[in-house]
Image: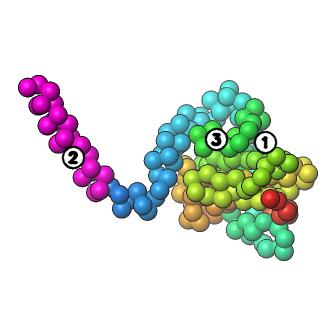
Amino acid sequence: MRAALFARFSFFALMGLACIGMALSPAVAQEPHKAEIDALRKAMEKYQDYKVAVRDLYLSTVGCVHYAGEKTAHHMDYPKGAMGIHFVNVTIQGPPDPMKPNVLIYEPVGKELKLVAVEWLVPLTPDLKQRPSLFGQSFMGPMEGHEPLIPKDYVHYDLHAWLFKNNPLGMFAPTNPEVSCKDSDFALLEMPTRMMPGP
Ligand SMILES: [Cu+2]
């Protein structure tokens, strides 16, 4: 008797879930990686306090990087805007982990640092057989290192995700026109780096 009741209950519960699934599917189709991105944002929230990031070995590279938006042949096409200050964790190695970006990006706002984005930086090594991708997004590159903070010979792919500040150019655009380095004493206007051949 109990088993029969349970079976009936389970059947209706499953039907209910199926209906919810059907109701949700259009939104899921629009943003296929929304749940993953929300989970990542939640996991990264603790780094809104930059001291927590430093304790976890995300170390500041100090310069607040921004771009004028000029285009040069064979160089990366970075729309006018800033990235901000990169905090890099060199202890995170291996293929890019969607839940463990190796870079956090902060915008100086007044005397505060606001977490705005995360980034995956993947060096081009001989064992890398194809362009990395996460969340259905192909990484940019390969490209030379970003002088003056990263040496030219550090050829890499990268992908940004603006988890904590809206980017009118899109969640995965390399620069954000709404991020500024005006409050930083260490603003660095960078030239877009040169593209390199890759697999
Ligand atoms: Cu790069």
Residue 61's label in the rendered image is: 1
Residue 12 screen position, x and y as percent: 17, 42
Question: Is the C-beta of the residue carrying label 1 under 8 Å from the nearest atom of ligand 1?
Answer: no
Residue 74 screen position, x and y as percent: 84, 71
Mark in front: 3 vs 1: 3
State the SS at label 1: strand
- Seen at 60% across and 44% down, the residue is 98
Question: Is the C-beta of the residue carrying label 2 under 8 Å from the nearest atom of ligand 1?
Answer: no
Relative horizontal placement of residue 44, taking residue 15 as reference (left or right): right
* Residue nearest the viewer, comparing 128 with 181: 128
- Kindly indicate whether the residue at mark 2 contacts the one at mark 3 (C-beta within 8 angstroms): no
- Kindly indicate whether the residue at mark 1 contacts the one at mark 3 (C-beta within 8 angstroms): no
Residue numbers of the magenta segment: 1-23
Instruction: For marks 3 and 2, give the CA distance.
Output: 34 Å
Residue 97's label in the rendered image is: 3
- Seen at 54% across and 49% down, the residue is 164
State the SS at label 3: loop
Q: Is residue 172 above or below residue 74?
A: above
> Which residue in the protein does label 2 denote?
16
Query: Does the magenta portion include 15?
Result: yes
- Seen at 45% across and 47% down, the residue is 35
Give the position of the N terminus as an image quadrant.
top left
State the SS at label 2: helix
**Label 3 or label 1, whichever comes before in sequence order:** 1
Residue 153 screen position, x and y as percent: 91, 51
Give the position of the C terminus as an image quadrant.
bottom right
